[in-house]
Image: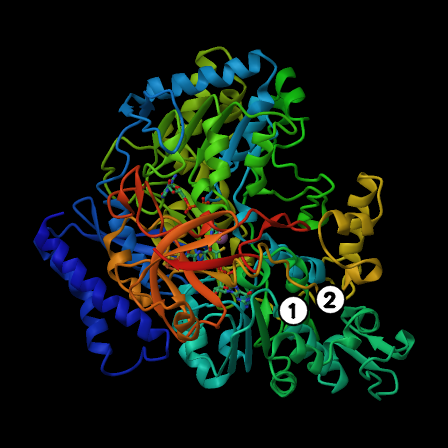
Amino acid sequence: MSNKVDTGRRALLKTSVAGAALSGIGCSSSSSIEPVMKGIEHELPAADTVTGTGQWVGTTCQGCTSWCAKQVYVMDGRAVKIRGNVNSKVHGEASCPRQHLSLQQVYDPDRVKTPLMRTNPRKGKEHDPMFKPISWDKALDLLADKILALRAADESHKYALLRGRYSHINELMYKHLTQMIGSPNNISHSSICAEAHKMGPYYQDGNWGYNQYDVENTKFILSFGADPIASNRQVSYYSKIWGAALDSAKVVVVDPRLSVSASKAHKWIPIEPAQDSVLALAIAHVALVEGLWHKPFVGDFANKQNQFIAGQDVDAAAFNELHTHGVVDWWNISLKDYTPEWAESVTNIPADTIINIARDMGKAAPAVQVWTSRGAVMHTRGTYTSLACHALNGLFGGIDNKGGLFPANKIKLNKSFPDSKPYLDAVAKKGVKHPKIDQRGTLAFPALKKGKPGGGVVTSNTPNGMLSADPYDIKVMLAYFNNFNFSSPEGQRWNEALSQLDFMAHVTTNISEFSWFADIILPANHHMFEKWGVLDSIGNGVHQVSVQQPSIDRLWNTKDDESEIPYLLAKKLADKGFDMPWRYINEQLLDPETKQPAKTEKDFGELLVKYVTSPLWTDGAAKYGDNMTSWKEFTDKGVWNSHPYELKSRWGKFKTETHKFEFYSKTLEKALNKHAKNHHVSVDDVMKACDYHARGKEVFVPHYEDPYRFGDEKQYPLLLVDQKSRLSKEGRSANTPWFHEFKDVDPGDIANEDTAKINPIDGEKLGLKTGDAIVVTSPVGELTCTVALWEGVRPGTVAKCFGQGHWAYGRHASKTFGKEARGGSNNDIIADRYDRLSGASAFYGHIRINVKKA
Ligand SMILES: Nc1nc2c(c(=O)[nH]1)N[C@H]1C(S)=C(S)[C@@H](COP(=O)(O)OP(=O)(O)OC[C@H]3O[C@@H](n4cnc5c(=O)[nH]c(N)nc54)[C@H](O)[C@@H]3O)O[C@H]1N2
Ligand SMILES: Nc1nc2c(c(=O)[nH]1)N[C@H]1C(S)=C(S)[C@@H](COP(=O)(O)OP(=O)(O)OC[C@H]3O[C@@H](n4cnc5c(=O)[nH]c(N)nc54)[C@H](O)[C@@H]3O)O[C@H]1N2
Ligand code: SF4
Ligand SMILES: [Mo]
């Protein structure tokens, strides 16, 4: 990049970050902003008069889980500008500010440009791997030999495939190749992402997934930690619509920290960490006592007389329940005691405030939506917060209702690839039968994904399994698009486990902390500009599917993680005598139009995306949404949109045991009984082993579990509040200069610094002022960063963004690459704990810390 262009882009981003920030507060139509926005909109494409070759190409951003459909303006093979895909009915041209950072990611001079091999046999954070360039052929030779050696020794289960971010063509790399090699160990990142979040929706209404919120028609938004104009899912759409929502709905944000959304809300409740369920339960209690629940959804007493009186049991037979199950059981088992006065005594939130919120919600019902977030639920007993918060959506009737919330619209995609079981040879058949390395399904790890004990991943427990060789050790690992020693709590455990591996291959764009422990590095195409992939997203009542396709000239000797690499690896294995994966690819993964296999690895990514998306552009797609008739039409437009969500479509047929919205979760009861039976114990024994307090019937209803805290309160008097940065693209944007330069778009943060935000009250006690360098210590580790005194954080807590503290990744991310971190990594001080029912890692609530001047 020449300096001249750089300055221009810098100026562009500056204005557009400001624009995007403003659009989030409802100023998008302000006449003072409009000329600036118009200017930006046309600035770069107009420059194309020089070459006349530019065009918009459809793709998808994976800067966060919003997975927005994008258009990249490409001139002479280079990407120069990005906007939301105008063909999207979810967000249209709108975006979040992070889209611009992807230009600095793809053109990052620190990207891995060719395969690399470790030359220093000693592994460890302190040992420079001394990588040297090798050819793709040599790299794949080394990997294939290691895999074949495991198979020859009948140890194929000691191979593991790790997946971080992914697209919907991941199944070959993730599942089938791993199985055909003969290993049960395909480990995804889901449980460091947000599995606890899904527990409420699944065990109450049968949706193992996220919801979309009808913000345009709502009258009341209650957010437990969600900050939809800065983080969460579908940031582009919610940023576009939030200003209007503030005009037409009341917004209450519950968060220990003044998030962007909290700063715009009608009310901010700075809750004590991991105490959200108290508030949710007390609101539910008031809703019943005051008769505020939504009767067309929940039903009513036969005699229409409200019999819910605090502390008193109710006769279930007196209530005619409609689309819900167990409202009276819930009341009798736990809810009757959760008075607003009780809630005030636990949280200091005035009882009156709680009563008023419940009344406002009752008035607004059913146009009510309750958001949860990782922050509210990813703690050690978070399943029950997830259930308590989501229950409010049932009680006030927002489920599938106008102004409420819905799951993803039904569409058809071939996300599942053909069965690979016929391609499992004797070694593989034996190998896949081993238990998984993350110990899922053991007594203390129910990981109850979709009602199945051991159905979910326990990502962060993988290094514990590896280090204790329980159930066995792992010898060979292939990992892609992940950085688990940076992104998991107590990442130090990963460093140790990775150091012990015989062989590890990392597929990555940059030499990250994880790559540091690799034997070979396989350089990846950047997902947004260079790779074939496909993703989906929900919002605005629409479910969209969008393509990722190569739009620019590949700069370096890189390859697609989910297509070219497994293709070439399968070929290599076949050359060396093990041809099952190669046969599977050539016999099963065929172009849906020509019915032919790919001719070369270069064609394979496109073939896989065609395979997954063909239901959208061949017969029958119009039943679900846009009527598209060809692959070309799909790739030209870049996005396919579903029909609008059909309101109330699940009422009467929820995918739960009772087909109702379950306040008393029969679905959870069944799953937990199965898990208990697997281990020949009672459900109470399971709860004890998993460190929850509930026993008996309480286990199956939303109830209060006091938060688990870790560390001595005297020694560690403060609590850490981890948050996402507005400019974080998961762990991946820290090597972009703009990330640091514009860091002050995070409320309370300081540009070019990594800050711990501390309330001035605590600052005074500790003798700290803004700009001081500090050491933050927890019982498991420490980090250094800078103080920002700020009123927007609850006294007694310290808010700090996740995303900095890289000691690798590149020149901007780290202070000295491979040696010294820039800022501090939150995961160095977050102890490795779990919400065991979901398998989710705890990132909140338990982290007691102290802060001292450095
Ligand atoms: N800007 C940005 N957006 C992103 C991403 C990103 O990297 N950057 N990543 C995407 C990904 S991978 C995911 S999974 C989603 C997750 O999106 P969400 O599920 O919404 O989760 P987070 O933003 O991680 O949640 C953290 C929030 O919870 C608050 N919090 C912390 N402790 C508590 C508590 O005890 N109670 C309450 N009520 N709040 C608390 C924090 O202050 C912060 O606002 O975001 C996506 N969106
Ligand atoms: N403290 C704290 N920890 C968190 C979170 C938090 O809010 N706070 N958020 C959690 C959440 S929600 C998630 S989802 C996880 C994410 O954690 P991970 O799944 O580990 O993902 P990243 O940290 O983004 O790392 C992805 C890695 O892939 C490589 N890479 C970057 N771009 C590309 C690409 O285009 N292609 C390929 N093949 N590789 C690439 C780089 O090595 C990069 O480090 O982190 C979790 N960790
Ligand atoms: S970073 Fe997230 S919200 Fe922003 S454009 Fe990319 S996917 Fe969309
Ligand atoms: Mo995530």
Kindly identify which residue carries mark 1: 277
| Mark pair 2, 1: CA separation | 8 Å
Q: Are marks 2 and 1 in contact (CB under 8 Å)?
A: yes
Residue 597 sits above or below residue 306 on the image: above
Q: Pointer 2: what residue?
A: 703
- Numbered circles on residues, count: 2
Badge 2 element: loop
**Mark 1 crowdedness (10 Å alpha carbons): few <14, some 14-19, many ≥20:** many
Residue plotted at (47% across, 17% down): 146
Quadrant of the rendered image containing residue 15: bottom left
**Which quadrant does the C terminus fall into?**
bottom left
In the rendered structure, the answer to whether residue 499 lies left or right of residue 23 reads right
What's the residue at 87%, 83% (across, down)? 302
**Measured from the top left, where is residue 283 in percent x and y?**
67, 78
Instruction: Pinpoint residue 635: horizontal percent, then vertical percent.
Output: 36, 48
| Disc 2 within 8 angstroms of ligand 1 (CB) | no
Numbered label attached to residue 35:
none
Q: Residue at x 42, y 74 (%)?
A: 792
